[in-house]
Amino acid sequence: MSIQLGSNQEPPKQERSAETRRQLLDAAADELLDGGFARFTTHGVARRAGISRGAQQHHFPHKHRLVTAAVHHLAERSLQQLEGITSDGSLNSTRRVLDALFEQYAGPLFAAMLDLSLAARADEQLRDAVQREEHTVNRMIDEWAHRRLTGCDDAPADFDELFAMAISTVRGVAVLRLLGHSQESVQRQWKYTRDQLLRLLVENRS
Amino acid sequence: MSIQLGSNQEPPKQERSAETRRQLLDAAADELLDGGFARFTTHGVARRAGISRGAQQHHFPHKHRLVTAAVHHLAERSLQQLEGITSDGSLNSTRRVLDALFEQYAGPLFAAMLDLSLAARADEQLRDAVQREEHTVNRMIDEWAHRRLTGCDDAPADFDELFAMAISTVRGVAVLRLLGHSQESVQRQWKYTRDQLLRLLVENRS
């Protein structure tokens, strides 16, 4: 939605509110990525966003709600990038899809999701909210990948199981990066794994 | 080493020191598993172990050293259990090895390792110690699995790469449990994945 402003006009209240909310979510996502949930505070987020505590509390009265909304926000930003990656079912485009999926699991969104899930183990209040959000984010990424890695009629009967296993394999290699393994060794393992997955997914499909 | 004690004799000083150290490591491991690194404090560990602050500081003056020693201690406890699981290369024993490996990655040791690795991203001092320990623990578990899943002369040239990929697949499914997915759905995916890995590992070997 675009808005037309005269030189002396303020944006309408609803617009300002949406903008404040977006600024809070950007700041919350950055706060989470920089220090993890352990250092995440609502006043830290308000300060980072340059927004008053009152406005922050109006939009997100609860820390748990802010932190899960921040993860959702990160997931939406990721999906926007992912939507630009298309596939025609060829080896090359399937390779690009797998690479993009790998970067998701080795990147900030998944690191934040894991961090929250681990923190939620010792925090009952957080647990429900995080699990719900994790399922949503997981489904968003899964569905994106599924749309690009399937899409033909002659897939084998167990394609969905194969697909879930392939995603887990991607996740399992990507986690090595979060565990601090060297870029070089993770990349080497990823290249080998990607070729195996390509064979599994493309050969099983055609 | 066994020691003979008369009824009025205290254990020798060296023995008492080793026992104090073991109690501290047990308590530190439990502290880490209960609250994660975010809530981990050296005085919390001393209190849990019922050991004086002075003795704790004597054994582990630095929090970072205590926390990585606790992870190492957890890994040694895990390996002791794993050593009891042998393999004769048959389908059944390979399945047991894969199940045990899965439980490691879905369990407390790996959760603690991930938690520390994520915390280390925002803590430079912690980073080196955690990365070193992560490599040690990773190698311990890897070597255990490697000894049980290989061991014949006619393995294909890329068996080590296949093996690393299989381990990553196990890790990728197991992480779903840490992410809070239901026991049931993780177990379903694991059973399918295990059968695929058995085919990959056993068929490629014989």
Image (cartoon, coloured by chain):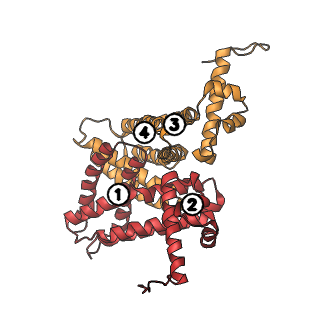
Chain colours: A orange, B red
**Which residue position holds label 2?**
B47
Outermost residue, front side: B8
From the image, state whether disc 4 or disc 2 is nearer to you.
2
Q: Amino acid at mark 1?
A: Glu
In what quadrant of the picture does the N terminus of chain A appear?
A: top right
Measure the alpha-carbon separation of dots 1 and 2. Answer: 30 Å
Please state the chain letter of the residue tagged with numbered disc 1 in the rendered image: B
Of labels 1 and 2, earlier in sequence is 2
Q: Amino acid at mark 4?
A: Asn
Residue B33, compared with residue A22, is above or below; it is below
Of labels 4 and 3, earlier in sequence is 3
**Which residue position holds label 4?**
A138
Residue B49, compared with residue A126, is above or below; it is below
Helix, strand or loop at disc 3?
Answer: helix
Residue B89, compared with residue A71, is above or below; it is below
Residue B103 is marked as 1
What residue sits 55% from the left and 35% below the top?
A: A64
At which x and y percent is residue A75? Answer: 51, 36
User: In the visual, does A140 lie left or right of A63?
Assistant: left
Quarter of the image holding residue B60?
bottom right
Measure the alpha-carbon separation of dots 4 and 2. Answer: 40 Å
**Which residue position holds label 3?**
A75
At which x and y percent is residue A94? Answer: 39, 44
On the same chain, marks 1 and 2? The answer is yes
